[in-house]
């Protein structure tokens, strides 16, 4: 047993660090730190994407043939850890992590050549059409209907919680193509253009004031049959592949540890808090949980590295990390006392347009970050859904 | 990076599991019989552990030896077996200290012929492990010890004690014979049925050990955390088995979502506790004390929560003495509080950061 990295992996880590030192400019770090929501805005995210693409490190979750890096699971972990510790902006998962690997796995040669390169170059931005007003945790009950009409589908219905739909050129969308079979079997995976007459976007403003998600309405919107991924009715299988791919190892613990350490440094100088044993113990308990999470992730990584398939422990990581994220963000609001109550309405909270913080920049970020982070235990399968998965697949209940 | 057991670690695990299967055999009879004795454990089982080399785990000596990782593996398996024999109290701790001090008394610990117990805790110290009022006083024949000790684990049948006492050079450790006339011992039972002792020392002759109290605390904490991890695994498995068979309202209890979610919470605690124990056991030497303090605090709190959940899930049966559940809860109560409660272990963890 050992929890260290090999010499080759450490050399890779140094290479990543050197790259981040040289290429991750301060404006991007400020943008990442000035973003209270989960996704960074394109002005930050796309620039970072361009820099990574120039280095050939962008599509590290893709097969080598599709432009991937060929990194081992350990290298992917190291890369994500170093990026997080350096305050790199979070890459948008929609094209790179979600639909890209799906097209690479299930797409026709023609689809691969049409879509993949344009994801890397950010010529196409993507959004995900999964949840519906009537289908949240119960995704298989989705009702958006796609009816075949010659070489295209006519799509009617509505998607919700659609992150960055207002920036997207394309949506990958689960739609019902056959209402007469069991729910999972009647779903197809369609790619559709966002900029067309039948698509309407309604912004949904979060309680912190951020515009991150939307509701999307389809009124005889068109999806071309050649843009369907896989066969008709294969949508559920593909959606599951996407989820499993999303679970191919994670790196959340190191970022949470870094955030707790940062809170600790702020607590030490916060009037009325520095030296308070209750605060010190509260942060220490958070850190123990985060350190445990880091090892839990490394245990999963060790399984992957040996070619074994990690089981539903990934649900465990989602469950623990989302709850812990919220506890950290709650502590941050508490830490700043009455300064923690400020909630700037201006966006973005970086760059020249950012309003002057009251107290400190960290205090300014605390409330909007906390409000946004209530989403962590809801998106991507709520905590309750994760518990259902664990109870069924791990505990056999 | 690799979390698989090494060959040596697999041997340690196999040895303890063989012991558990042979002596404990899946019910509580052996535990009850051991607890019913004056010592609180079975001398035969103790001799068997000595033969198997288990009593030398974590020392540089004896059959299984090894370091922190081996201690973790052994203690987890002992916890899972709900073993009554005080391996943590009368083997890991004295083994570590006597081995560090190169003491001749080590041989008796390793071969199981002598019980040596650490007499450190004091009432006024509460959970401050560095608060020692017992005094080591230089006298004509050497050093004599004056003071009082509580919660001396495995103290009931100890042949000798390792007593912490404050002298001119700070806290020292002194080997004291249990037969000494100036030593008053009162045995009593702890929550887990083990026999502890309260000591009053009035000028007892002590032999200074060349070992530091502060050095053994991390190992004791890791061992306690690992034993609690084993107990958590036992609680989780037995509770799941019960929930799958017990029928109420026409279906197994485990079919109810409210039960499923509580058990998922317990499962998460067990997995996170395992990660914290691994983190401590595999820590670099410079980080070991801090990591062990953190693991002890984290696992202690988690184990107690899992034990309470297990009692609740078993309903009326959960509060009886008939199931392993209550025995595991009581053992966790003891382990969670000794060598520093959660807050004091957390203070050590964050002070060392």
Image (cartoon, rainbow, N blue to C red):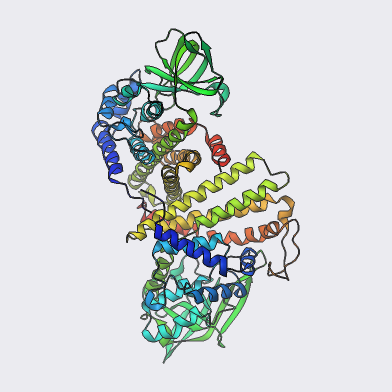
In this rendering, the answer to whether A239 lies above or below B328 is below
Picture quadrant of residue A358: bottom right
Residue lying at the far bottom in this picture: please name it. Answer: A150
- Left or right: residue A9 compared with residue A17: left
Can the viewer see residue A387 in this picture? no
At 36% from the left edge and 52% from the top edge, which residue is drawn? Answer: B2
Can the viewer see residue A271 in this picture? yes
Judging depth in this view, the residue of B252 and B305 nearest the camera is B305
Residue A367 is situated, as x and y percent measured from the top left of the image, at 67, 58
Residue B9 is situated, as x and y percent measured from the top left of the image, at 31, 42
Judging depth in this view, the residue of A99 and A270 nearest the camera is A270
Residue lying at the far left in this picture: please name it. Answer: B22
Picture quadrant of residue A374: bottom right
Residue B213 is situated, as x and y percent measured from the top left of the image, at 48, 28
At 55% from the left edge and 37% from the top edge, which residue is drawn? Answer: B348
At 25% from the left edge and 36% from the top edge, which residue is drawn? Answer: B18
Residue B50 is situated, as x and y percent measured from the top left of the image, at 28, 28
Judging depth in this view, the residue of A216 and A87 nearest the camera is A87
């Amino acid at each position: 047993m050992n929890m260290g990295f090999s010499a080759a992996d450490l050399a890779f880590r140094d290479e990543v660090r050197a790259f981040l030192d040289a290429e991750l400019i301060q404006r991007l770090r400020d943008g990442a730190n000035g973003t209270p929501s989960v996704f960074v805005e394109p002005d930050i995210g796309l620039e970072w994407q361009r820099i990574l693409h120039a280095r050939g490190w962008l599509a590290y979750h893709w097969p080598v043939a599709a432009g991937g890096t060929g990194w081992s699971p350990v290298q992917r972990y190291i890369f994500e850890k170093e990026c997080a510790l350096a305050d790199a902006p979070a890459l948008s998962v929609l094209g790179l992590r979600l639909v890209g690997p799906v097209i690479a796995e299930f797409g026709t040669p023609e689809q691969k050549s049409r879509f993949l390169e344009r994801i890397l170059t950010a010529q196409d931005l993507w959004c995900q059409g999964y949840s519906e007003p009537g289908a949240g945790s119960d995704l298989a009950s989705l009702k958006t209907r796609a009816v075949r009409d010659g070489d295209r589908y006519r799509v009617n219905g509505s998607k919700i919680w659609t992150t960055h739909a207002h920036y997207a050129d394309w949506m990958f969308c689960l739609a019902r193509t056959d209402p007469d079979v069991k729910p999972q079997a009647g779903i197809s995976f369609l790619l559709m253009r966002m900029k067309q007459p039948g698509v309407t976007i309604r912004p949904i403003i979060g309680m912190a004031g951020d515009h991150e998600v939307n509701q999307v309405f389809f009124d005889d919107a068109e999806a071309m049959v050649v843009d369907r991924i896989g066969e008709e009715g294969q949508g559920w299988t593909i959606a599951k592949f996407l989820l499993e791919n999303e679970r191919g190892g994670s790196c959340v613990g190191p970022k949470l540890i870094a955030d707790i350490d940062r809170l600790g440094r702020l607590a030490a100088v916060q009037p009325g808090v520095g030296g308070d044993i209750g605060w010190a113990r509260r942060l220490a308990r958070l850190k123990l949980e985060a350190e445990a999470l880091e090892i839990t992730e490394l245990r999963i990584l060790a399984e992957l590295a040996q070619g074994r398939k990690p089981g539903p422990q990934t649900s465990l990581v989602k469950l623990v990390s989302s709850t812990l994220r919220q506890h950290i963000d709650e502590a941050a609001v508490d830490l700043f006392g009455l300064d923690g109550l400020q909630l700037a309405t201006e966006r973005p909270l970086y760059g020249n347009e950012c309003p002057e913080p009251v107290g400190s920049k960290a205090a300014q970020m605390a409330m909007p970050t906390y409000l946004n982070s209530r989403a962590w235990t809801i998106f991507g399968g709520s905590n309750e859904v994760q518990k259902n998965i664990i109870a069924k697949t791990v505990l056999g209940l | 990076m690799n979390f698989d057991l090494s060959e040596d670690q697999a041997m340690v695990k196999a040895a303890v599991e063989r012991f558990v299967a042979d002596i404990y055999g899946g019910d509580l009879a052996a535990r009850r019989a051991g607890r019913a004795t004056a010592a609180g454990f079975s001398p035969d089982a103790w001799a068997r552990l000595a033969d198997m080399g288990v009593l030398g785990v974590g020392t540089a000596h004896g059959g299984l030896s090894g370091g922190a990782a081996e201690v973790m593996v052994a203690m987890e398996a002992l916890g899972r077996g709900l073993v009554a024999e005080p391996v943590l109290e009368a083997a890991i701790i004295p083994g570590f200290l006597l081995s560090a001090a190169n003491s001749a008394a080590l041989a008796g610990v390793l071969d199981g012929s002598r019980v040596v117990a650490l007499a450190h805790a004091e009432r006024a110290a509460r959970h401050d492990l560095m608060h020692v009022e017992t005094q080591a006083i230089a006298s004509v024949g050497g050093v004599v010890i004056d003071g009082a000790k509580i919660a001396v684990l495995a103290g009931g049948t100890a042949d000798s004690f390792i007593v912490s006492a404050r002298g001119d050079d700070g806290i020292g450790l002194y080997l004291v014979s249990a037969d000494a006339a100036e030593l008053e011992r009162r045995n009593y039972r702890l929550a887990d049925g083990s026999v502890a002792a309260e000591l009053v020392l009035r000028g007892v002759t002590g032999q200074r050990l060349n070992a530091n109290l502060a050095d053994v605390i991390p190992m004791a904490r890791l061992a306690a955390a690992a034993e609690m991890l084993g107990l958590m695994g036992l609680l989780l498995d037995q509770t799941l088995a019960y929930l799958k068979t017990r029928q109420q309202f026409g279906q197994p209890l485990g079919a109810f979502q409210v039960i499923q979610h509580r058990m998922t919470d317990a499962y998460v605690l067990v997995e996170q506790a395992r990660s914290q124990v691994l983190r401590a056991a595999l820590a670099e030497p410079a980080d070991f004390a801090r990591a062990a303090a953190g693991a002890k605090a984290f696992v202690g709190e988690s184990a107690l929560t899992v034990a309470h959940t297990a009692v609740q899930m078993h309903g009326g049966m959960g509060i009886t003495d008939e199931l392993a559940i209550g025995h595991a809860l009581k053992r966790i109560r003891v382990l969670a509080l000794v060598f520093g409660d959660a807050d004091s272990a957390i203070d050590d963890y964050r002070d060392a950061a």
